[in-house]
Image (cartoon, rainbow, N blue to C red):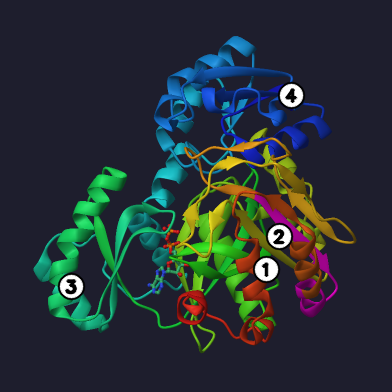
Amino acid sequence: MFKRILIANRGEIALRIIRACHEMNIEAVAVFSEADRGADYLRQTDRAVCIGSTIPKESYLRMDRIIAAAEVTGADAIHPGYGFLAENAQFAQMCRDCKLEFIGPSADAMRKLGDKASARQIAKAARVPTVPGSDGLVESDEEAVEVAESIGFPVMIKASAGGGGRGMRIARDKTDLIAALKQARQEAAGAFNNDAIYLEKYIDQPRHVEVQIMADQSGAVIHLYERDCTIQRRHQKLIEEAPSPAIDSRTRRDLCHAAVKLAKAAKYTTAGTVEFLVDAKGKFYFIEVNARIQVEHPVTEMLTGIDLIKLQIKAAAGEPLGISQRSVRTDGHVIECRINAEDPYNGFRPCAGRIEKFRPPGGFGVRLDSHVFEGYKVSPYYDSLVGKLIVHQPTRLEAIRAMQRCLREMTVEPIKTTIPFHLRVLEHPRFQAGEIDTGFIERTLL
Ligand code: ADP
């Protein structure tokens, strides 16, 4: 097992990993930017190294400085968390070339699955259903029109290197498509340094259901069931829950089986998520793989009682998972709300600033993953996540009620947060009935 892990991240996920390390008797080394100097979670680490200025490009994205910090502090592995360098295959390779284990899949698996068009090819070859669309990348406008006409409009243009809900455009007809293609390429080149795009059929009013997988170095792959992340704004998740209220046990079995098949086909190791869209008839289609631990991983932890970060570290260290598929059990219902420092009454504008009053909720089956406290300053330079509130109850209805109670109890002042917006979603009869799709927020609440 590792002796000392360097955490190449910040905020709540850094704290989450520090906690797992200490429970495993592993030392935790943190890196931080000037903006995070003095942050409370850094005091929990065994060592903390400043790696540069506030902007991510000069600190959390500086591979050379992170590797140097690991070498200086004698770390033997690097945990990338999510975001920043978590899905950067070059960084994974660089770490391993420097005899530092990267806690994630091989650079090769990451490259193959990180590129969405290539992940689709792997899924197809493994006979996992994919959204109807182009066979690989679309090179010309003529080819795009041909594909779109054969699958039928509306279609979605997607950046192959896209992520975080960015790099997607809907085209409703041929004229729309030709105009959108150019913009999509330009956007993709600007945002991801890669203008490769492909086409998918636009699935009408889908649900987003994803499967958590875990794989060790010996080729053993297990799934830890699904999470439903249908409540989104602009393709970004706001609320996640498990089990999915939208699928029956047969679909669940097929979905989880498909995810494992795909992981095996890509020789995937450690923690990953296979994302699917589920249409109104309950048919599912693969969309992409997230080759890292995800923001919403606590949902699965509460549902299964399994610590995913510890398991991920074990798998990266070459140890067997020690958990068979049959021993993975789920219990009750879990809901997670992402509490962001954003003003829901003002276009979800980020609201950086000092938190003067902070009162976390508590009680039966309540978990808050957060790095903030009274006096903490939310930085405008990083994502606006203040904390993840997770509740675990016997049934979905009880989970909704517990979440409502917690959101009313929680105080984060004077900055604006998404708490009041979550309350609006939770009290909506359609949400309560589980009758939602990915367009629910935009259609009903904005
Ligand atoms: P990202 O990597 O940016 O998160 P994804 O491919 O995972 O992008 O898609 C994010 C969200 O966009 C999905 O959860 C869904 O709401 C929407 N989406 C993606 N592909 C389609 C599609 N073919 N039809 C309809 N909605 C889609």
- What residue is shown with label 3? 177
**Do labels 2 and 4 touch, CB within 8 Å?**
no
Label 1 – label 4 distance at C-alpha = 32 Å
Q: Amino acid at mark 1?
A: Glu
Q: Amino acid at mark 4?
A: Arg
Please state which of residues 431 and 270 is positioned toward the viewer in this rendering: 431
- Spot occupied by residue 244 in the image (x, y as percentages of width and height): 66, 75
Q: Quadrant of residue 124?
A: bottom left
> Which label number is shown at residue 299?
2
Task: Give me the residue at 11% from left, 66% from top.
Answer: 141
Region rendered in magenta? 387-400
Task: Give me the residue at 48% from left, 79% from top.
Answer: 206
- What residue is shown with label 4? 43
Can residue 393 be found in the magenta stretch?
yes
- Spot occupied by residue 403 in the image (x, y as percentages of width and height): 76, 67
- What residue is shown with label 1? 241
Label 1 – label 2 distance at C-alpha = 7 Å
Q: Amino acid at mark 3?
A: Leu
Label 3 – label 1 distance at C-alpha = 35 Å
**Do labels 3 and 2 touch, CB within 8 Å?**
no
Q: Earlier in the sequence, mark 1 or mark 4?
A: 4
